[in-house]
Every structure is written in structure tokens, then in C-alpha cells.
Amino acid sequence: MSYFIQQLLNALQLGSIYALIALGYTMVYGVLGLINFAHGDIFMAGAFFGFFTAYLLKLPLIPTLILSMLLASALGIMIERIAYRPLRKAPRMSLIITALGISLFLENFTRATLGGQPRSFPKLLEIQDFTFLGASVTNLQVVIILVSIFLMLVLRYIVQNTMIGKAMRAVSDNKEVLALMGISLDTVIMVTFGLGSALAATAGILVGLAYPVIDPYMGITVGWKAFIAAVLGGIGLINGALVGGFILGFIEIFAAALLPSTYRDGIAFTILIIVLLLKPTGLLGRPVIKKV
Amino acid sequence: MSLMQVENITMNFDGLRAVQNFNLDLQEGELIGLIGPNGAGKTTVFNILTGVYIPSQGTVTFAGENITKHAPWQINRSGIARTFQNIRLFDNMTVLDNIKVAMNYQMKYKMFSAVLRTPKYRQEESMVLKESLEMLQLFNLVEKYNFLAKNLSYGEQRRLEIARALTTKPRLLLLDEPAAGMNAKESEELMHLISWIHKKFNLTILLIEHHMPVVMGICQRIKVLDFGQTIAEGTPDEIKNNPKVIEAYLGEEVDH
């Protein structure tokens, strides 16, 4: 039983990281119809922002987190402004290729300037163990899960209840009409990139704290998995990203717990393929019915 | 007082001249009809007036400001709202949220104060809710505030689209074939609705319409387009008896 609870906590921890990143994919997809392949690298950049803020400015956890979120938002907004906005009217394929290019650029630029060797992330939290229902838990796990859930709730609140949130939902519903409501599409897209990047940066720092090494390529695998989580839940849907993230976290942890751990990615992807075969729009996605 | 001057608008699409030398002088408070056979360029004129297209030549001046090259959202903020021939709502949002979105830019609060639920945020949000419900009440949609827009009937969707356009507080309302797809009774009700809006909101209205009874019944002046050119202009009676119009447009109707 305690082993089960132990794994449950691990799954929650991993799932909340996936969910935080998946939110960025799904939000950008919602407003632009773009799979932002550079998003995993924003997660990486966020971890490095946290690294430098903590080392150079010697800030504690919360200020590090806030400053890195702001920096990552600025980076996300800048990428959109420079690379994606000029292509707004170009074919979708050009936009996707640009996103892949930005992804490679961020990885290699980071490697070229900071070097490719892994760096150990500063310990911003005094790790303490305690026992919970027989399972050994660290305060770090609790922090990761709580911070993630808190931010997800904030985001949901913004999207559901604020004017900018309504505008974001309106964009994903009908882009052309939005302008006739006196709302600038550019502003909505900017806010979307800013919010998504801030969440990715949080995930980067939480990963840095949990597995205390970071490197320029850390965003690739995690980024892909988060993208998968978003598709699994139903891309474009906020709740879909949350559901997909946690499900993927659970599958991976329990696959590794029950089978040799090398199977975990294989099993995760197999389940993804099965779900998409049965429900191509994702778990929460509604089937697309085209009227003719 | 003159509200809008459209001067010598020409619109070319790769060699196709959709609109040629179009002129319009709208006085504050007028209700004007724009008619013409299919493909005459009526909707193109609307797209130019709302900033969707930038005309190849000519200028659009609204309330003393040259808006020819303004973006659609800026033009909406200057006070022009429109509806579409094929209804365009935010289908997957509720009726209430469709209206609330239209109030978006009138809001002052920032995202930050929304998260903290400051008094300013709550005050503005309750004001928005109150005004939205009042608007829905006027259009007899208040009972359906929680329906998704796509689940409304056709006539209700049309009313919601007009209500949403009015929520942006326009001075000029452009209606693109609001009676499209309606039967005689529905279009008569719509005619009354448009007249009523015109007085109640103290608006200037430019109306594209195919249903002649609607146009003739409520418009003070009518402009007729054919193949991108203005072929006639005048009061409903003058238009009815204009031989060019009968040839281009009404003639077709008489045939069957």
C-alpha cells in the first residue's frame, strides 16, 4: 500500500510537470492552430533563467520563480513577434517549419553560449523527508504538486472569468469576428504566448529542483511528451491538457513500476496511439462533424 | 451632420474590378439601403468600410477621421459594427459570453486585478453582467443566456448577432442581408426590429438586403450597385420606377 502511495505521488509530480507544459501547447494551438515546437525549449530556457537568477542574484525560490516566469514570457512573446507574426497569413506548413527552426535555434544557441555539459541546479529548497501513510515524501514533491495545481487553477480562472480569457476563447472559436468586437488579435496572441511560456518556465524550474541537473537539450523529450499529453487530452482544450498531462504521468510511472523501466516510454506511446485510434480528437475532444 | 464620407472607392482583385468609383455620404441618423444583384460588390463595400480590405483607390472618412487603412479592431472602436450575411457567432460560447466579449475593450481592469478579485474587477464585471443581460432582454434572448450560440434557432442567432454588434456601442451599424434565409413573416418582424433599433439606439444604419419589401419599407434612401458601379440612387419610390434598376435587378424578380 505504501509503495502504491509512493508511486501515486511520483505520478502526480510527473503529471503536473507535463500538464504545465501541455497547457502552453494547447493554448497556442487554440488561438493560432499552430503546434509550437519551440515550446519545449522555452521550458529549457525557463530552467536556465531560474539557474542564473538563483546563482547570480542569489534569490530564494519564489522570487526566482516569478522572475523566471517574466523572462520566459518575454522570450515567448519575442519569438511570436519576430518569427510567427510575419507568417500569420502564410501557409500553416511554413509556420510549423519555422517553429522547428526556432526550437533548434534555442537548443544550439544555449549550447553555444553556455556549453553542452549538464549543470547542477541550485538547491533553493531545504529537502526534508517525512512519512505520509507509510510512504516517504519530500517537501519538494509537495511543493511541485501544489505550485503546479495552483498555477493551473489561476490559468483556468483567467480563461473562464476574465475579459482576456473570453477573448482567447473567442479567437479559437472565430478569429475574423474577434476584430469586429474591437479586440486586437495581436494582443490576444501575445498574452497567450506570455502565459504559456510562464507556465513552461515554472515547469523548468520544478524539474531543475527535482532532478537537479539541467542542460540545453532537456526540453526535447519533455517537450514531446507534453505535446503528446495535450493531444491525448484533446488539443486546444485547457482541461484536455490537464487530463492528458496527469494520465501520461500515471502511465509512465506505473509502467516503470510494474515492468522494467526501459519499457515506460514504449508503453506510454502505445497507449497514446490506441487512444487516438479510438478517439482521434483526444479524450475530451468532441468529434468534428463537417456540414456539407 | 455628415457621419461618413466614402470617396471614389475602387477595389481590384487580381484584375477583377469588384467595386468602381463608389461614393457615399452618410448623414448622422440615416437609414440607407444598398441593393443590387448577386456579385454586384455590396459585401465588398462592407469589407472595405470595416477594414477587412484596404481599397485599391479612394478614402473612407468616419467622424472626421481617415480610416481607410485602419485595422478592423480599430475601426470597430471608432464606432462601426457589422453583421454578416452568413451568421458568424462564437458558436461554442454561451449567448451571454457572446455579448460579454463585445464589451471587452470597454473594460479597464487588468488580468492581475482579475486574479486577485479586486473591488474594481468585481465592480466592472457586475456592470458587464448587468448591461449584457439588459441587452439580451431587449432582444428577447435573456431566457437563453446559458445556451451555446450554435444551439439557438436561426432567427435567434440573427438577433444575437445584431445584439452583439450593438454591444460594441457603434454609431454606424452595417447589416449584411439580415433577412437572408427568412420567410415573409420573419422578414417582416426583422423589418420592425431594424426600425426599432434605429430609433432606440439613435443609430445610423447601412443595410444590404435582397428582400425588396424590407428595403422599400424602412430605408430613407437607396443606392443600387451593379457590376461594381452605382447605377441609381434615391428614395424608395424613385428607385422603384428607375428603368435602369428594373433592368438590372427588379426585372429579374418580375419574370418569375
Image: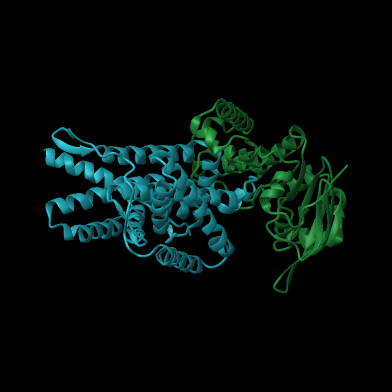
Residue, x 18% and y 49% (percent of image)?
Answer: A254
State the quadrant of the N terminus of chain B: top right
Residue B73 lies, in percent from the top left, at 66, 49
Camera sees residue A236: no
Residue A170 lies, in percent from the top left, at 53, 46
The mark tally for this picture is 0
Image vertical order of residue B71 relative to residue A7, above or below: below
In which quarter of the view is residue A116 placed?
bottom left
Image vertical order of residue B122 relative to residue A229, above or below: above
Residue, x 57% and y 58% (percent of image)?
Answer: A81
- Please, which residue is most extreme toward the bottom here? B15
In this rendering, position of residue B167 left or right of residue A269: right
Residue A272 lies, in percent from the top left, at 27, 57
Residue, x 59% and y 51% (percent of image)?
Answer: A185
Shown colour of chain A: cyan
Image vertical order of residue A95 relative to residue B203, above or below: below
In this rendering, position of residue B9 left or right of residue B103: right
Q: Which of B170 and A6 is in front in this view?
A: A6
Please say which color scheme the image uses.
by chain
Q: Which of A70 and A26 is in front in this view?
A: A70
Residue A86 lies, in percent from the top left, at 59, 63
State the quadrant of the C terminus of chain B: bottom right
Shown colour of chain B: green
Residue, x 28% and y 40% (percent of image)?
Answer: A140
In this rendering, position of residue A265 left or right of residue A53: left
In which quarter of the view is residue B51 placed?
bottom right
Camera sees residue A130: yes
In which quarter of the view is residue A135 placed?
top left
